[in-house]
Amino acid sequence: MAELLRFRADEPADHPGITVDAFLDQPDADAVRIEPGDDARALIPHLARLRLVEVNFPIFGDGRGYSSARILREAGYGGELRAVGDVLVDQIAALRRCGFDGFDPDQPLDPADTEIAFARWSAVYQPAADGRAPIWAARHGETA
Amino acid sequence: MYRYDDYDQAMVDTRVAEFRDQARRRLEGRLSEDQFKPLRLMNGLYLQLHAYMLRVAIPYGTLDARQMRALADIADNYDRGYGHFTTRQNIQYNWIKLEEAANLLADLAKVEMHAIQTSGNCIRNISSDHFAGAAADEVADPRPYAELLRQWSSFHPEFSALPRKFKIAVIASERDRAAMRLHDIGIRIVRRGDALGAQFWVGGGMGRTPMVAPCIREFVPIDQLVTYSEACLRVYNRHGRRDNKFKARIKILVHELGAAEYTRQVEEEFAHLLTLGIEPPAAELARIAAMFDEPLEPAESAAPDRSDPDFALWMDRNTHPHKLPGYISAVISLKPVGGIPGDATADQMRLMADLAERYGNGELRVTHTQNIVLPHVRQAELHGLWSALEPAGLGAANIDTVEDIIACPGLDYCSLANARSIPVAQRIAERFAANGRTAVLGELKLKISGCINACGHHHAGHIGILGVDRKGTENYQLLLGGSEAEDVSLGKITGPGFDETGIVDAVETATKVYLKERDEGERFLDTYRRIGMEPFKAALYG
């Protein structure tokens, strides 16, 4: 877990996520791993017992995990959402906006590049799952 | 037209800095070409046959004189003194060095322009009616809605790695001048009583599997436009195919699910998203719309003097009625006979910018047919405009004729192409200019693609040409009966293909069938639809 990057104060779950099918059969499990083809909404009835959802990106170009993350946050999931797999520094700002608060990529992220990537965008055009107020809200004195 | 505020400016400036950093990491070898590719594509940078190609976004095809001059300077400073206007109402430069690309983007940002999302698997530049804001038949100017969607789609985090590219067009009239139903999402702004709304057509496209989009919602209230778009995209991002690049566009998803099931899923997602408050407020749309609503100076309603037959011909071919008295929209043809469709030199760009200021309000449009529009020309001064165009090689009176050909860059530039497109377009235009039949044939939309990806819109040509590679030689298939307009249809292949000379002859043969068979007032397309393929086949292969 040396490379794990987290934006949470709580302790990380101590075991990795199991498949969605296995998770649904294990009433005491608190960690799950979503593959790109899994339906994140299948987890919604079980959010209360979840502490960790790993969303796997087998290749960085498969963007289904972005929707999975937002769907879980929109449903009120408050545990850790961790991006794992082929996660590159150029994606992490967008992933963070979709609700990810943990990153455990296959290839370690360069700390300096990571810092730049998260700090880069001072404003955003649209609401997402990170609670940032969009530019239109700032223009019209509204909050998102 | 739309002007950036500090927020918009900061977003494009940030993007330039981000790209500069990415290009540096690539040049230092810290990013592999595989890792760099999706990043440069999100900034419009392609690796072509000879060099990098950079595509600059011209949102909904609208730009002003200052921006056109900046495009000319870029052509001089970073390219070989010209640029190529595209079927997505953008401009691309074919001879770009990676080391200089970030500086080019910085120059663009100085005039409120960018190359954001002009390629890659993301929401692309949004296109629109090139007569928007001027056409008498629109229910509203569609561009404020396109701008609202431009901002929503820019750096949209959830949709940054879609299954495939995604193209949206917004129009606001019954007439379709933007090939709306051949887009991933086509939106028509409509009026119902006093209320404006958006009609959604989803799942159209050209490419190797052309499809005409079905209507999935007749009326989305205008204050839910962004939310409905988000629902359409989320269903696509989650369920669009990713196992096969050639089946990854939304048209395949809509086709495989069926329009009814796709719509059901969108409606379900829409109902959910409505609870999240993601729609910009009405005040934001009003802020944008006000910038497109600059009043034109009153102009004297004076019909131009048509005594010069060359001017009269140009006026008949290259102008479009304006909603205000005293004004007219003029189309500058980038299709000189023997030229490269859509190309303009830096000097031509500067001249068009000057003319836009002298004869209009400084605004210009790029058409998806690769020409330039001056939307608001004072009618009384139309002759002066025309007189200035001819000496610069911009005076061709051939809009919507057989000489006004759409052609992709083809094998002369593109690494995907199987065959050359530009020389075929040149030979065809030369043939009809020489035999004098251009005028007789009237409206005849001819479109050429150099491979099945269909960037030259061959499926939608009244006459379409598709270049293929047949055992190492270029071969050209002929299609008839396509249309991208409100009478949208997909062309049908006539039969075996032709070589380069043969395809020029074949096009001429098809036009002869039309001239022989046509009824009073019929266009080529009308005659084809009435008499069918057989008479054409008989003449071509008989």
Image (cartoon, rainbow, N blue to C red):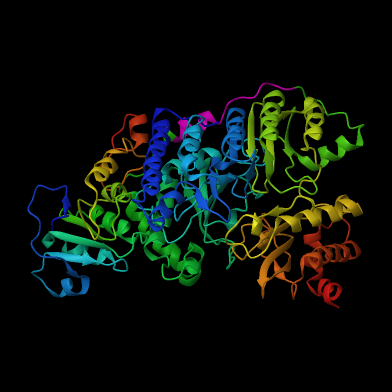
Q: Is residue B293 magenta?
A: yes
Q: Is residue B200 magenta?
A: no
* Residue A65: image location, x then y, percent: 30, 60
Q: Residue at x 81, y 68 (%)?
A: B502
Residue B507 shows up from this direction: yes
Left or right: B65 in relation to A31 = right
Q: Residue at x 88, y 37 (%)?
A: B310
Q: Is B279 in front, or is A111?
A: A111
Residue B136 shows up from this direction: no
Left or right: B522 in relation to B291 = right
Q: Is B66 in front, or is B20?
A: B20
Q: Quadrant of residue B136?
A: top right
* Residue B47: image location, x then y, percent: 52, 53
Q: Residue at x 89, y 65 (%)?
A: B517
Start and end of the magenta stretch?
Answer: B285-299
Q: Which quadrant holds the N terminus of chain B?
A: top right
Left or right: B482 in relation to A126 = right
* Residue A39: image location, x then y, percent: 29, 67
Q: Quadrant of residue B305?
A: top right
Left or right: B277 in relation to B264 = left
Q: Quadrant of residue B417?
A: bottom right
Q: Is B243 in front, or is B480?
A: B243
* Residue B299: image location, x then y, percent: 73, 22
